[in-house]
Amino acid sequence: MDKLLEIKDLHVSAQNKEILKGLNLSINRGEVHVIMGPNGAGKSTLANVILNNPQYTKISGKIRFEGENINELKTNEIAKKGIFMSFQSPEEIPGISTLNFLKYAKNKVSDEPVKSFKFRYLLKKYIDELNMNPKLIERNLNVGFSGGEKKKNEILQMLVLEPKLAILDETDSGLDVDAIRTVSKGINMYKNDTNAVLIITHNNKILENLDVDYVHILVDGKIVKTGKRELADEIEKNGYEKYKKVEEE
Amino acid sequence: MASKTKVEDINRNIYDIKDKDNYEFKIQKGLSREIVEEISKKKNEPEWMLDIRLKALEAYNKLELPTWGPDLSELKMDEIATYVKPKTNLNTSWDDVPEDIKNTFDRLGIPEAEKKSLAGVGAQYDSEVVYHSIKEDLIKQGVIYTDMETAVREYPEIVKEHFMKCVPITDHKFVALHAAVWSGGSFVYVPENVKLDIPLQSYFRLNSPESGQFEHTLIIVEKGASLHFIEGCSAPKYNKVNLHAGCVELYVKDDAYLRYSTIENWSKNMMNLNTKKAIVGKNAQIDWVTGSFGSKVSMLYPMSILNGEGAKTEYTGITFAGAGQNLDTGFKVIHNAPNTSSVVNSKSISKDGGACTYRALVRISEKAKGSKCSVSCESLMLDDISRSDTIPVNDIETDEVEFSHEAKIGKISDKEIFYLMSRGLSEEDAKAMIVRGFAYPVSKELPVEYAVEMNNLINIELEGSIG
């Protein structure tokens, strides 16, 4: 109904190698989508290409967001439209504190100036909920953060920036059980009827406490199967072999 | 991606403010015995100072231009009027400073900086110090902070003992020139065991076409004393080549501490050939913090001479070269006593075809057993047409040392740009943030208002070059 993201017949290459080979995906407001797939299937490519990472080349196909073609927009313009990506390996940026960066980025994606009091109040709340060390935000952005702290910091940024669509690129990888639970908690705090989440993952631990609407299996640059929650459980049991064979036939 | 916009002259409005050429007299161009005598006479100098000047003039005439480093053929010494005296005498109060001069300083933020509880301001306008103040309590502690001319008149014994002793007049051609025609500059004397906890600052600026600036800084920190001295430099722009050949002599006596911070922002036609040296006593320490911006050519190699056992030095510096700039900088350290140590952290940024060279010397003498030296230099190149070179010379005469040298040359990572852009920053903002981050180890060593100024300079330098 209320379509947020629509991808049609998307072909994408990187370093002259075609990675996405006619991908279709449609996400409505209020939905949680999950993309699973074997290594090298193109999962991260999909996340990167939605945000128009210049490392990837769109050969053909369309990406629409709220009905608008965003193929040619720059990454920061896409961010301003309301798409957020949580990175697999967040970059370390010295010279700016995490707190100042959050304020700076919030102002960049907002139409109106950010109200300081409300900002601080919400920030404190999010930091508590994510079990983060409050002193962490005084440190330079991601500099010297542990792997888990970096991932939590991505979720914190998602909560602060309040995007319409949040794409989580293997946010759960490398995290212990407790940290994965915290990430799920963050997603639940963020999620409402007007926004949507696209979770790229290898395992369904992160899905345990989430209300998942669709699970897509991405194999060799295409979505080969879409199902409900049970599909993730099936993958956990039987792996991707069955779907790989379908491709080869 | 959009093609890059090349902007030759970035907007330097706040830094390039020309006032009317307003001076009492301007002596004839070129350099002769008569000129040197005239300078000395005009300053009512004692005989001994004139003697130093004349010896230096002799050395200047004998010495050749350096045969290495950047091309200096553009310099025509006989076209450079060496001495321009502004229409004002030394002022003790800001109110007495003439309006046009005040405007220039106002735009550079001098009185504001002073209000922010800095201990004193000595601002140089052309060749004379026009404004000077020092807080009462410093005077009570016996601290002397004045211009060099006054120091020559009022503290001849101290000046005689130290002037051109740390840097010999025969060191190189531009030192000889400096000693012959020096004018203006700061003199600081901190008596034994006096520790200043707020920094002293001084601001230099060139304003007259074809005038060189040859200011002399002499700082003596006596035994067990401690000082942070800040020099900020910025110059307006002219078409003809300008020469800056200042000299800084720092004496850090036994158990003393000196931190010497500079931000230099010369106009893009300046030939900046500055000489800075420090002699460091037993268990004493000198820390240099340097940001070099602007100038057409810079040759600047601060040196620490660690003469006392256990002496220490740290150098933290950054150089930024844009289109048409050739900045040849580096740090020299001489370990002359046992258990001395040096830490060097040098950074350079080049863009739009600018060239940065890190030229360094580490000498550890046979006497300096148990000494340590660690050198790290990192270069960031913002495009494929810029240059960065590292030319280290290491001369180590004893085995009992710890020595390490690390050099890295890099480019701004596309991943970092993408990460920041995904948070809403434009490409330009993202690059500026990454460059500021690269410079952060230097800016964090500066007092906050200088760190802000340095970040602003980086932003101005980056403006228009990224599209």
Image (spheres, coloured by chain):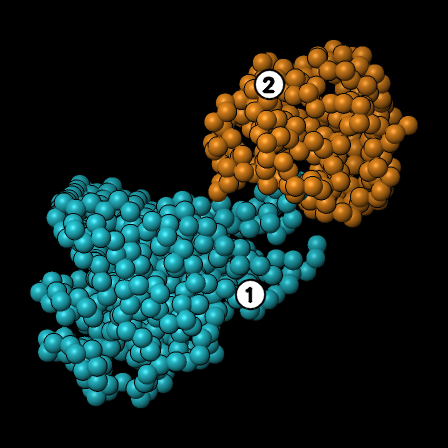
* Residue at 31% from the left image edge and 63% from the top image edge: B93
Residue B270 vertical position relative to residue A168 in the rendered view, above or below: below
For label 2, the SS is helix
Give the x, y percent position of residue B104.
43, 68
* Residue at 59% from the left image edge and 31% from the top image edge: A117
Q: Distance between the residues labelled 2 and 1?
A: 47 Å
Q: Which chain carries label 1?
A: B
Instruction: From the rendered image, report the letter of the chain displayed in orange.
Output: A
Q: Which chain carries label 2?
A: A
Give the x, y percent position of residue B423.
65, 39
Which dot marks residue B11? Answer: 1
Around disc 2, counting alpha carbons within 10 Å, would you say few (fewer than 14), some (14 to 19), or many (20 or more)?
some
Around disc 1, counting alpha carbons within 10 Å, would you say few (fewer than 14), some (14 to 19), or many (20 or more)?
few
Give the x, y percent position of residue A203.
69, 17
> In screen coordinates, is B177 left or right of B436?
left
Give the x, y percent position of residue B266.
42, 66
Which quadrant: the C terminus of chain A? top right
Determine contact: label 2, label 1, CB under 8 Å. Answer: no
Q: Chain B is drawn in which colour?
A: cyan
Q: Name the residue under label 2.
A: A129
Which quadrant: the N terminus of chain A? top right
Which dot marks residue A164? Answer: none
Residue A183 vertical position relative to residue B345 in the rendered view, above or below: above
